Image (spheres, rainbow, N blue to C red):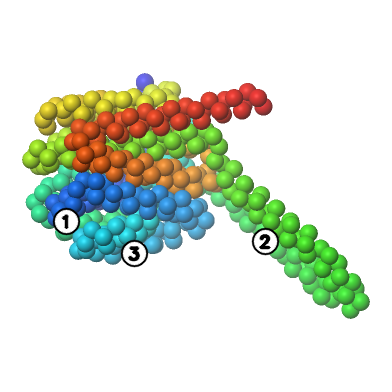
Amino acid sequence: MNFALYRELLAVRPIRRLLLVGMVARIPHSAAGVLLTLHIVLTLGQGYAAAGAAAAVMTIGIAVGAPWRGRRVDTVGLRRALIPSVISETIIWSIVPHVSYELLLPLVFVGGLLTLPIFSVVRQSLGVLATGEQRRTAFALDAISTELVFMIGPAAGALVATAGFSVLGLTIVGIATSVSGLFLMWFNPPTRSAESGATSDSLSGAAFDSSQQEAAEAALVAAAPAHLQEAAAGFATLAAAGDRRQERSGLRHKVIHNFAWFTTAVAAVFAVAAGAGMVLSGTDVGIVAALETGGHQAEIGLVFLFWCAASVVGGVIYGAMHRPISPILLLLGMSALTIPMAFAQDTWTLSLLSLLPGLLCAPVLSAASEKVAELVDERRRGEAMGWYGSALTGGVALGAPLAGVFIDGIGPSAGFVAVGVGGVVLCFLGLVLQHRRRRRLAAA
């Protein structure tokens, strides 16, 4: 292991500043999950299944919006892509805490759709700023900073909500996120390397030359004698059907080209991301439910401290390793080790049992992000990271209500079992996809 990689990486000012900005920008939304859950349960008087459904609706919005937001970053640049988020975050999260549960659901969906894409932007920029072995360390540092955020945000959200200030807390989340977006626009971290930018400029120049040639040909036809134009019109009629066929064929080729990066290997990583999101969100809801049911809401932050601190330790160790570990194996371990949390009897045993799955949390996210950056060309990496974010948040959308249903029907312990088993199932899906890829490569 080479822990000096951290010192070398943090000595690079743009990387250090990006990690700091990303960490600060994530704090408001890390508190939003607990705030929203407790607002629905304590203020609106709904159950944990309803709270999980609201979290699912919000994360579905994020999953739908993430690829589009990532594509906007690729095509129009970071600053213009962030404008809708900066405007919407304050407006939506200022309205959400004042409405009924029925009106809350569509609002949180729109909020998710237009959420600040801080996670994908930071990962995309790190993929540009760090290369080679440094990239693994950079993604590990990003995962570690995320865990530090989740030590602060959920604990603060739980304290605010249990004190009866969930309305104020959700409003502050929106304002703080908009301010973070403005700061990110000012910082404007790179999302594409200079070489890629030069390539894009060359392609744009080629397109411009092509359009000039088409314009010159059109002018030549317009200047031709009348009888030649009539003959050309006849040929154009015969060629119209062929042009339409070519147009349809061109559209198919364009779609295939746009998703050429989506290979079986990338699909396997997305399955891992979905599994990680499901286990983490289900565990999140399970911890809140276990402590709230026992009347220990004020101790939620203590369990999150143990859980996230273990993840920081795991992330530090993984980032110093010379070889990567398959994200599927890491998720398999995290999912299996989440199940014993169902046997916790009090706050302290729950905290201690959270240590083992926590150790693998940051490594799973770091390994999956690194794999996407390795598999996808940086010209399409923004879109790929968007879909990666969609898979992650899709898993979150599944995990929260899945845990909520089992918690309401059986008890808090059943939520941990449900998402742990679900994570194992998604690991096997990823292994199947990897096996199919190896068979296809062997046949080729």
SS type, badge 2: helix
Q: Residue 190 versus residue 109: which sits nearer the camera?
A: 109
Whether residues under marks 1 and 3 lie with C-beta atoms below 8 angstroms apart, the answer is no
Residue 224: percent from left, percent from top: 87, 75
Task: Give the residue at the far top of this rendering.
Answer: 1
Residue 181: percent from left, percent from top: 33, 56
Residue 292: percent from left, percent from top: 12, 41
Callout count = 3
Task: Name the mark nearer the viewer: 3 or 2.
Answer: 3
Whether residues under marks 1 and 2 lie with C-beta atoms below 8 angstroms apart, the answer is no
Q: CA distance from mark 1 to mark 2?
A: 58 Å
* Residue 290 location, quadrant: top left
SS type, badge 1: loop
The kind of residue tagged 3 is Ile
Q: Is residue 42 above or below residue 225?
A: above
Task: Name the mark nearer the viewer: 1 or 3.
Answer: 1
The residue at the point 38 percent across, 56 percent down is: 113
- Disc 1 packing (10 Å; few <14; some 14–19; many ≥20): some
Q: Residue 85 versus residue 46: which sits nearer the camera?
A: 46
Q: Which residue is mark 1?
A: 44
Residue 145: percent from left, percent from top: 29, 39
Q: Is residue 51 above or below residue 313?
A: below
Task: Name the mark nearer the viewer: 1 or 2.
Answer: 1
Name the disc covering residue 87, or none: 3
- Say whether residue 250 is left or right of residue 347: right
Q: Which residue is mark 2?
A: 208
The residue at the point 47 percent across, 27 percent down is: 431
Name the disc covering residue 104, or none: none
The kind of residue tagged 1 is Leu
- Say whether residue 186 is left or right of residue 248: left
| Quadrant the C terminus occupies | top right
